[in-house]
Image (cartoon, helix red, strand yellow):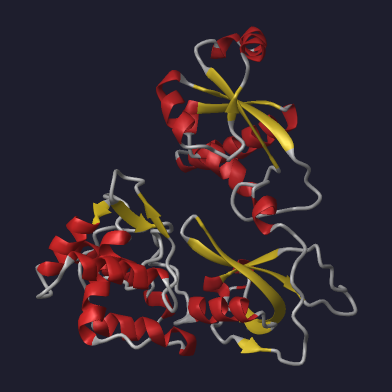
Amino acid sequence: MPVNKDAMARYRIIDRMLADPHKDYTTKDIEKAVARECPKVTTRMIQKDIKALEEAPFSKKMLRGMGGRGTVRYEDQSIPLFYQEITADEEEILREALGSLGQFEGLENFKWLENLKKRLDMPSGKKERPVISFARNNVLQIPENLLGHLYSAIARKKVIRFGYRKFQDAGQPFSQVTVHPYQLRQYNNRWFLICNPVGNEEYPFDPNLIYNYALDRMDGKVEYVEDLPYIDTPVDIDARFGEIVGVTYRKDVETRDTYFAVKPEAVDYVRTKYIHSSQDEVNPETEKEFIRKYPSLRDCKFFFISCRPNVEMYALFASYRDKVIIVEPDDIRETMRGMLYFMVKNYDELSR
């Protein structure tokens, strides 16, 4: 049945009230609200309007009497028929969110972003102090639009080829790399592409391999390789990275329990800023045993993490200076001790 202009205006007001999760309205409440904007409204008219919203084509299910006698609301209030104008606060939040997506500008499948900015009167290049500031590394030079191009390749499930140069090969030509891209991941203010090389005769494709390439080491020229089928990974990427600190994953290194002592002044900090997501405090019996074995640490609290040791883990422990001490296993403690020994040796040599 066709809906006239006056009825549609009433429907919008009624829809807003029936979808309000904060308050239940009676038919009389709705009539008063509608009457402020639409003339010649009657209770019978509002009752017919609500009934019309229950029937096709709207087909909204209603709940009656849930908030008191005579009240009515939508059964599912999360999906109103007519989305409302955004508030000033919502517009500001949206502006902030769109500003953080600036790295995706200029791409064919992100034209909606530019259009939305224009509707919000956000010209490209407009610089304002952000309300929320996310950590970023302005020294690293990521090629223009690279993040967006890689995002598109992952979303479209395309094999890609790009030039890459390792840190130790500075000044050398880029090597061509062909991969199945899976995820973009950030660690320590650096972006990485998580992927799997397509393989060759010397190194056949292994579906369980996961590589990472730093975006600031790429040449920025992402090419789709249309003649190679995309192969998704059977690996749970989040679970695999949950086994390590950072992004360096080595299959030949087993998951280990690493125990460490924390001095009193740093205990609260370590409790709230985990070295690894598996971090936990040892039980009282284990703590007593550690204090017996290491009496110099009697004032400390003892924790442990369960992960695959890697360079990022040792670097993170080193960042706590003398406040955190690895106690076991012996080989992990000695690796940490060796790193610190050479750090001190470098400084000692400066004073000779």
Which residue is the extreme one toward the right?
Answer: 201
| Looking at the image, residue 330 lies above or below residue 190 | above
Residue drawn 48% across and 28% down?
A: 322
Q: Position of residue 306 (x, y in %)?
A: 68, 36
Front one among 234 and 205: 234
Q: Viewer-proximal residue, 48 or 181?
A: 48
- Residue at (20, 82) in percent of width and height: 6
Direction from residue 43 to residue 204 in the image, left or right: right
Residue that lies at the very extreme toward the front in this rendered image: 44
**Position of residue 18 measured from the top left corner of the image (x, y, whole percent):** 31, 60
Query: What residue is at 46 percent from the left and 37 percent from the top?
Result: 273
Which residue is at the front of the view, 299 or 131? 131
Q: Residue furthest bottom?
A: 227
- Residue 183 is left or right of residue 269, and the answer is right
Question: Where is residue 106 drawn, in percent x and y?
Answer: 41, 87
State the residue at coordinates (44%, 77%): 56
Could one spot residue 88 in this view of the protein?
Answer: yes
Vertical arrangement, residue 21 with respect to residue 324, above or below: below
Q: Can residue 120 be seen in this view?
A: no
- How many numbered marks, from 0 up? 0
Q: In this picture, is 181 found above or below 160?
A: above
Residue 209, placed above or below residue 5: above
Where, by quadrant of the figure, is residue 88 drawn? bottom left
The percent position of residue 64, horizontal first and vertical second, equals 36, 52
Q: Quadrant of the N terminus?
A: bottom left
